[in-house]
Image (cartoon, grey):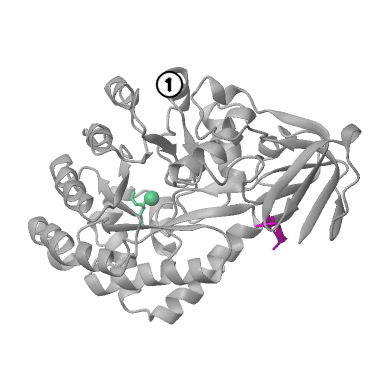
Amino acid sequence: MKLLFKNIKELLQVRDNGVTKLSGAEMKELPSLKNAWLLTENGKIADFGKMEDFPQINADETINASGKILMPGWIDSHTHIVYAGNREQEFVDRINGLTYEEIANKGGGIPNSAEKLQQTSEEDLYNQSEKRLQEVMKMGTTAIEIKSGYGLTTQAELKMLRVIKKLRENYDLPVKSTFLGAHALPKEYKDNKEGYLNLIIDEMLPKVAEENLAEYVDIFCEKGYFTVEDTNRLLSAAKKYNLIPKIHVNQFNSIGGIKAGVEHEALSVDHLEVMNPEDIEQLKGSGTMPVALPSCSLFLGIPYTPARDILDAGLPLALATDYNPGSTPNGNMNLVVSLACIKMKMTPEEAINAATINAAYAIGLSETHGSITKGKAANLILTEEIPSFGFLPYSFGANHIDSVFINGKKI
Ligand code: NIG
Ligand code: FE
């Protein structure tokens, strides 16, 4: 199947093969071709160029993209879209003045979602989650990571991971799976963190590995959740099963989680709303991608990740949604890119790089996704007719997407 786009106003994020992540300095540029064509063949980007050099190709289908921008689809490297029900009540509690921490202390928060999920059948959980996946695909997400962590029992964690696996099997976009058993203490282990960590390490990890249910391991390294010591213990244990760390750190406090992540060669460290200069130093020279989640900051009213400090230190940065029922009930990458510009002072070029090629790196996909490169997957966004790519983040809250393609097929 050959699909041809002609008269593309601008073909965005055109990169040579081998570019797998961009540093702060490199993120300033967003290479493009104006008045271009692009051919997909068997789900891959086969060729592209300027219209003035168009070699008269015959395709099965031709799309006239005049006035429109064609770009790689968004990559959402951090989500929790497999969950049951919602936490609307906590939303109202927060409006009435309670903090995220206070809500968690009075029995809300992650264990609240866990209780709901434990009582939900695998089939129902799949149906609820599938709706969210379809929703975000329409908004341009063409590769996604999904975490467990709302189960908090062996059975319920495995149920979540099986739902993620089923989504991967039933959909064409890449779906990466992360085991986040260490998301919070379940109510039964409220005063027995050791016991819960033992359960994760001795029972959950071996089962997750045996069924091959996850590629990554995550932990919420934060005051009131898991310490740096817990993080070191879990990540060391997970290494034996070849699970690569991608961890929640520095959301509310800087307690040394970034250093631990870098030492364990984490693929990414995510959240980073609270960063001190030592945290930034730790990341220099590492292969660990910092990931910011600005819609979580918007929803909870907490600080935004200090992107300028990170980028101006020469570090790369990726953006993701964190779509989850507690801190970010929204999976719109277009909004994330806007917020990065408006609230984190990233330029449109930097934000788009962070949501495509660097995001691909954060889930091990940058060899195959995240840029317009011959041989990469034809996972694409075709915009509506817009004046320029900067118009995307500028018109915040709107998506301006005409159509989305996964492996060269319109969804
Ligand atoms: O990434 N911070 C930890 N986990 C989620 C929120 C979980 C929840 O409140 O349900 C996050 O923000
Ligand atoms: Fe998260």
Q: Is residue 410 part of the magenta span, yes or no? A: yes
Left/right placement of residue 47 relative to residue 250 reads: right
Above or below, 124 against 61 in this view is below
Residue 116: quarter of image: bottom left
Residue drawn 54% across the image and 71% down it = 170
Would residue 322 appear left or right of 184 to someone viewing this image? right
In percent of width and height, residue 361 lies at 47, 40
What residue is shown at x 88% (from left), y 33% (from top)? 53
Give, as a single range, the part of the protein colored magenta.
Answer: 405-411
Could you tell me if residue 285 is visible in this image? yes
Identify which amino acid the numbered label 1 is placed on. Answer: Asp
Say above or below: 322 vs 337: below
Q: Which quadrant does the C terminus fall into?
A: bottom right
Q: Which residue is mark 1?
A: 309
User: Would residue 225 be visible to someone looking at this image?
Assistant: no
Residue 390 location (% of width, % of height): 71, 32
Asked if the magenta segment contains residue 259, the reply would be no
Whether 59 is drawn above or below 121: the answer is: above
Q: Nearer the viewer, residue 38 or 253?
A: 38
Instruction: Please tell me which residue lies in front, 343 or 157.
Output: 157
Density class for disc 1 (Cα within 10 Å; few <14, some 14-19, many ≥20) is some
Tag 1 secondary structure: helix
Image position of 264 (left or right of 169) = left
Residue 160 place in picture, x, y as percent: 36, 69
